Each structure stands twice: as C-alpha cells, then as structure tokens.
Amino acid sequence: MRLEKRKPSGREKDEASIKLLAQIREKLYSEHIGSARRAGFNLSWMQEDGLEILKEALFSRAARKTKSAAAYGLRKMRGRMEKAALKVLSQGLKHPDRTTAAVCENALLVLKGRAPRKFPSKHKTRAGKFEIRQAPAKGRRRVIIQKVDRRNK
C-alpha cells in the first residue's frame, strides 16, 4: 500500500526524526502482523506524534491487520497519553466502519482485563482419560474403549 507523505506537525526536532517516523509509519501498514504490531508499540512511546499516526491508521480505510496493530499501540500508551489513547479507542466504538468498531471493542475489553469476544469452539473436550485398545473377537475385530484409572497404579 502506497502511503501519502505525512505533513510534519512541527514537534519533530530534526530531519532524522521525520524520517524515523515515516519508516515506522510504513511498517505499521505492513502485511506482516508482527512488524505492524512492533511498529504500533514503537509509536506508543512517541507521545503526540505516535498518537496522531496511530489514530490516523485506526480511522483510515486500511486493512484489519493495520487497525489491530494501531489499537495495540494505543493500548500500550502510558503516562500522560494514556487518557488520550482511551478516548481515541472509545471514539472508535462509534465509528461507522465495523472493523474499526470491532477492533476498538476488543482493545477496550483487553484493557479492562476481560478476554475479547471469540467464536465458540467446534471441538468439545471430554473429561477423564480414555485408553483405546483392540480386542480380538470371533471373525471380526472390535474396538473397546475403557476408562483408565491411573491413580491406583
């Protein structure tokens, strides 16, 4: 995805910091989720500039991976930027784009200490341990399932 050049906010001190922000912003829009999350985390340490880039990525027409990485960066904001990041995530709940709203909802659930909403599992687990043995029978083989009690061994 080709990104438009970001307009400097005036808070950057020199040309090197502008280039670094541009590189990290490019990585945030990466297809590889690990690189995108790492970029989101790095932006979380960059105060107002990081918040601005993360907010732009969250509310843009980017892929879900990018929005998820931006929400991760907003979740990791600490210090005086923490309230601003929470405000951005709560604004995202009212966003007309469903993916943005879902990403923000999951991020706020993680911040509250609850697990994000997941789909129900297709596999059911059985309680207890079973051992499957084959016992010879007349003319054909039969599979017998016996409950094994491992405590008495």
Image (cartoon, grey):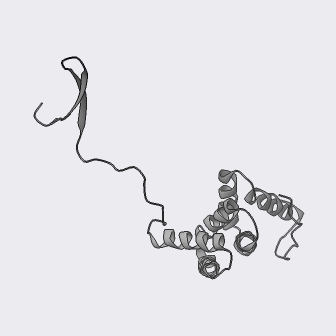
Q: Between residue 89 and residue 83, name the one nearer to us.
A: 89
Q: Between residue 93 and residue 43, name the one nearer to us.
A: 93
Residue 109 pos. (x, y %): 49, 71
Can residue 143 be seen at all in this image of the molecule?
yes
Residue 57 pos. (x, y %): 74, 69
Q: Is residue 124 above or below residue 57?
A: above
Please state, as top left, top right, bottom left or bottom right, where the N terminus lies in the image: bottom right
Residue that protrudes farthest toward the left in the picture? 152
Q: Between residue 105 and residue 134, name the one nearer to us.
A: 134
Q: Is residue 147 left or right of residue 117?
A: left
Q: Is residue 90 left or right of residue 50?
A: left
Q: Quadrant of residue 100?
A: bottom right
Q: Is residue 140 left or right of residue 97?
A: left
Residue 48 pos. (x, y %): 73, 75
Q: Is residue 114 above or below residue 121?
A: below
What residue is rendered at 75% in x and 65% in y?
A: 62
Residue 127 pos. (x, y %): 25, 48
What residue is rendered at 86% in x and 69% in y?
A: 6
Q: Is residue 78 above or below residue 126?
A: below
Please state, as top left, top right, bottom left or bottom right, where the C terminus lies in the image: top left
What residue is rendered at 72% in x and 62% in y?
A: 63
What residue is rendered at 76% in x and 71% in y?
A: 60
Q: Quadrant of residue 134?
A: top left
Q: Is residue 75 left or right of residue 115?
A: right
